[in-house]
Amino acid sequence: MRAVAVKELGAGPEVTDVVRPEPVGNEVLVRVEAAGLNPLDWRIADGMLKGTRAYTFPMTMGVDFAGYVEDTGPDARRFRIGDPVYGQVVDPGRGGTYAEYVVVPDDGAIAPSPSSVPHDVSAGVPTAGMTARGIVGAAALREYESVLVVGAAGGVGTFLTQLAAAHGLRVVAATHGNDQRRMGTFGAALTVNSREHPLTERVRDEYPGGVDALVDLASGPEEFAAHARLVRNGGVAVSTRFAADPEALYAAGVEGINFSLDASAELLDALAREIDSGALIVPVEARVPLDEAPDAVARNRSGGARGKTVITL
């Protein structure tokens, strides 16, 4: 089958032919219609999971998928052949989603696709959507009134902005471009282009006493610490880059969280309901065919992504 794979850790992705996986045990074989592109994809290909997961080469890239169940293993019970599904798989040894087929444990992060959108939209949801929804719960954002989202223009940021705004929070979206109109459609009350306006000054002007919450999707430790000083005493500061120092933040009266996604079918089911109800817009900004996926990965590496890129098969 055709796939986008790397031949070794850190190698550039190539369109190639690989052996089609076959489902065993409780796995299902999914015929992939579309695969979402995430920074996680190339980080895994660079060796992010080395020491915790077994890599097999050539390694097919990708973790997000949407498609149809093509076949099932002897112990699979949740799905039938032909069911439309979407989800996430993170197993370098079993292959990724930039391919015509992928195998997924049926008790893993796989669920019925949202019924109101096509697969090339559903594929943009799993990792970014689950991360955003997980952050809302882990940081108890429903208890606050304001949140600063750094890196708000990307996939996770646009989902998080929508979810936070839906819970009544006033969202300050920090981006690296002129995204005021776009972020406003997702519910941001204020968008700050940090390339044109110093973020600290703009937030201090708006919230002299500090924002209730910070979710930083982009910064390393030093920059994260500077952003965390914009949070009021009793607030919360979240990093998805493991840049938070919880002890130092605690001493300053702020709860610090280094967020790690625990992907699940339950999160996917909740996201599907929100999409089908019209409460959540999937921010797909670009669709590229499989042959152009290596170039799309290179663009994603360079940073500054807006919304989601989806690879179509």
Image (cartoon, rainbow, N blue to C red):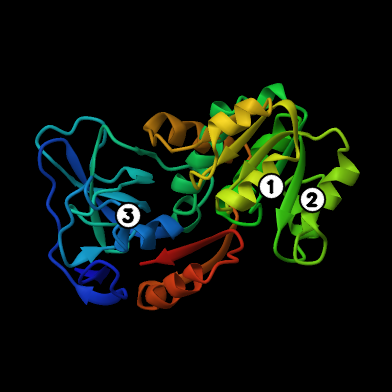
For marks 3 and 2, the one nearer the N-term is 3
- 80 over 36 or under it: above or below: above
**For residue 210, side relative to residue 312 (left or right):** right
Looking at numbered disc 1 in the image, what kind of residue is underneath it? Ala
- 188 over 195 or under it: above or below: above
Q: Mark 1 or mark 3: which is in front?
A: 1
Q: Quadrant of residue 238?
A: top right
Label for residue 48?
3
The residue drawn where x is 49% and y is 54% is 124
Looking at numbered disc 3 in the image, what kind of residue is underneath it? Met
Residue 259: image location, x then y, percent: 49, 37
Q: Pointer 2: what residue?
A: 200
Q: CA distance from mark 1 to mark 3?
A: 27 Å
- Callout 2: 10 Å neighbours few (<14), some, many (20+)? few
Circles 2, 1 touching at the beta carbon (< 8 Å): yes
**For residue 250, side relative to residue 227 (left or right):** left
Callout 1: helix, strand or loop?
helix
Callout 3: helix, strand or loop?
loop
Q: Pointer 1: what residue?
A: 226
**For residue 117, side relative to residue 291 (left or right):** right
The residue drawn where x is 22% and y is 76% is 16
- 205 over 13 or under it: above or below: above
Quarter of the N terminus within the rendering? bottom left
The residue drawn where x is 30% and y is 62% is 45
Closest to the observer, 236 or 31:
236
Is residue 56 in view from this perspective?
A: yes
Looking at numbered disc 2 in the image, what kind of residue is underneath it? Thr
- How many discs appear? 3
Is residue 281 in view from this perspective?
A: no
